[in-house]
Image (cartoon, rainbow, N blue to C red):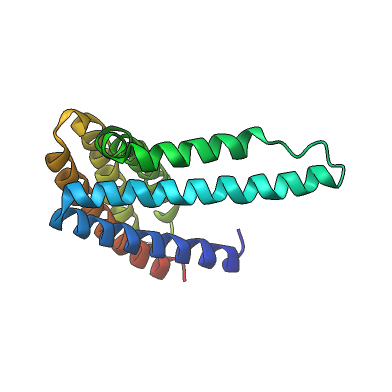
Amino acid sequence: MNSESWKSREMIRLILSIVLLIIGLILLGAPTFAMEVIVVIIGIVVLAYGIIQLLINLSKRNRGDANAGLAIPVIAIIIGILLIVFRGGVANVILPFIIGVWAIITGVMSLMEASQVKDFSTGAWKVALISGLAELVLGIIMIVGIIAGSNALGILLGVCLTIYGILSIVEWGIVASAKK
């Protein structure tokens, strides 16, 4: 991987870590409301994607492109509407599950990165290792915590995202300095 692509990938990772930290702090302040707002935002994004893609694909079909499918944009529109309408149920069950699975996947990726960085520095790989293990644990907690109530789940999600955001930012800083 060249240096420029690594830098851009790491900058995206840093920005996402900061966003997750901010979302975590918001969830700690107003868990139930924040979870529903997050679901509505996701619903709006998915709905907008579906509408835009539908318009693009309809335009392609009018120009004779038979490969411009309509199924995925229509499904995205339906999912976007469902997320907006049923935000409470989604906020309580589906969102924490998705975030839990995502945390487990990123935890595994951090553990893999720890093994790669181990050769570059004596200390950076330890932070990546701890971060990866913490991400795995937080992902499992999120998935298991789905049975909790909305407010408790929002607080749990807030704690998990805050810890994940902090660990990810620290890991980014150490890994970035180790790869220079």
Q: Quadrant of residue 85?
A: top left
Left or right, residue 174 beside residue 137: right
- At horizontal 70% and vertical 50% (from top left) the residue drawn is 56
The one nearer the camera, 30 or 85, is 85
User: Farthest right residue?
Assistant: 64
- At horizontal 47% and vertical 71% (from top left) the residue drawn is 180
- Work out whether 43 lies above or below 120: above
The one nearer the camera, 108 or 66, is 66
- Work out whether 32 lies above or below 148: below
User: Residue 54 at what x, y percent from top left?
Assistant: 65, 44
The one nearer the camera, 102 or 85, is 85
Quadrant (top left/top right/bottom left/bottom right) for the N terminus: bottom right
- At horizontal 57% and vertical 45% (from top left) the residue drawn is 50
User: Residue 132 at what x, y percent from top left?
Assistant: 31, 46
Left or right, residue 9 beside residue 26: right
- Work out whether 133 lies above or below 15: above
The one nearer the camera, 53 or 120, is 53
Q: Quadrant of residue 87?
A: top left
- Work out whether 110 lies above or below 93: below
Note whether residue 110 is visible. Answer: yes
Q: Quadrant of residue 152?
A: top left
Left or right, residue 165 beside residue 152: right
User: Residue 31 at what x, y percent from top left?
Assistant: 17, 49
- At horizontal 14% and vertical 34% (from top left) the residue drawn is 149
Note whether residue 123 is visible. Answer: no
